[in-house]
Image (cartoon, coloured by chain):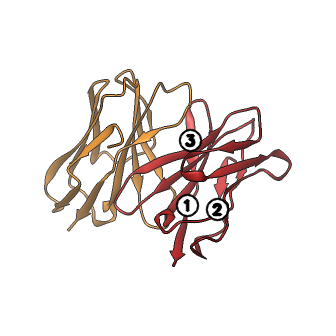
Chain colours: A orange, B red
Amino acid sequence: ETGVTQTPRHLVMGMTNKKSLKCEQHLGHNAMYWYKQSAKKPLELMFVYSLEERVENNSVPSRFSPECPNSSHLFLHLHTLQPEDSALYLCASSQDQRSNYGYTFGSGTRLTVV
Amino acid sequence: AQSVTQPDIHITVSEGASLELRCNYSYGATPYLFWYVQSPGQGLQLLLKYFSGDTLVQGIKGFEAEFKRSQSSFNLRKPSVHWSDAAEYFCAVGGPDKLIFGTGTRLQVFP
């Protein structure tokens, strides 16, 4: 248990479906992140939230929609995805967004788009 | 431009042998440096980090890394590898509010 919990662990969805990924941390961290991990590519930062406010959005397609209702929870809402969106989606948290002592990662959600 | 390079995509070692994983970076200021490990089906776990001070840092699981400013490197080492060390290792570089990851090095350990 890393302190950051992601559900579901695996998700298969059709291109017309709508689904959500959930991330939860009870470490008292104030910053949360979504990363995309594809084979043979560096981790891609998608979104950053600090104190529930989105502070970074790295040119992510609008079919990915994040939500941070409180400092402990982070969601990634998915709709009309493409097969190239299949990847491991990792959530991470850190103490705060302006002091980088290292991130705590969840185990990820393996997403397959069919 | 800021970047991280892990030149070795895949390394194979025998159990008990020593290990060195390479990491080179390009960063405009004094960087924060990290090594993470990812076991199959898992997220990334922080092994060690360097912010300042002693350039040789100790981490968990018997790993250490040395920051060499002149070479822009932060190589990860372990004197004797165990079979359980088989995983993917990521070097990351950044500042207070940013982290850039390398593409990773997959470590395979033979008995």
Q: In the rendered structure, which amino acid carries the disc numbered 3?
A: Leu
Q: Position of residue B23 (x, y in %)?
A: 68, 57
Residue with the mark numbered 3: B99
Q: Chain of mark 2?
A: B
Identify which residue is drawn at 49% across, 67% down.
B86
N-terminal of the pair, mark 2 or mark 1, is: 2
Q: In the rendered structure, which amino acid carries the disc numbered 2?
A: Gln
Q: In the rendered structure, which amino acid carries the disc numbered 1?
A: Thr
Identify which residue is drawn at 36% across, 28% down.
A27
Residue B33 shown left or right of residue A103 in the figure: right
Residue with the mark numbered 2: B6
Q: Chain of mark 1?
A: B
Dot 2 falls on a residue whose secondary structure is loop
Q: Are marks 2 and 1 in contact (CB under 8 Å)?
A: yes
Image quarter of residue B9: bottom right
> Alpha carbon of mark 1 to alpha carbon of mark 3: how far?
13 Å
Identify which residue is drawn at 78% across, 50% down.
B72
Q: Which mark is residue A112?
A: none
Residue with the mark numbered 1: B103
> Alpha carbon of mark 2 to alpha carbon of mark 3: how far?
15 Å
Judging depth in this view, the residue of A61 and B30 nearest the camera is B30
Q: Are marks 1 and 3 in contact (CB under 8 Å)?
A: no
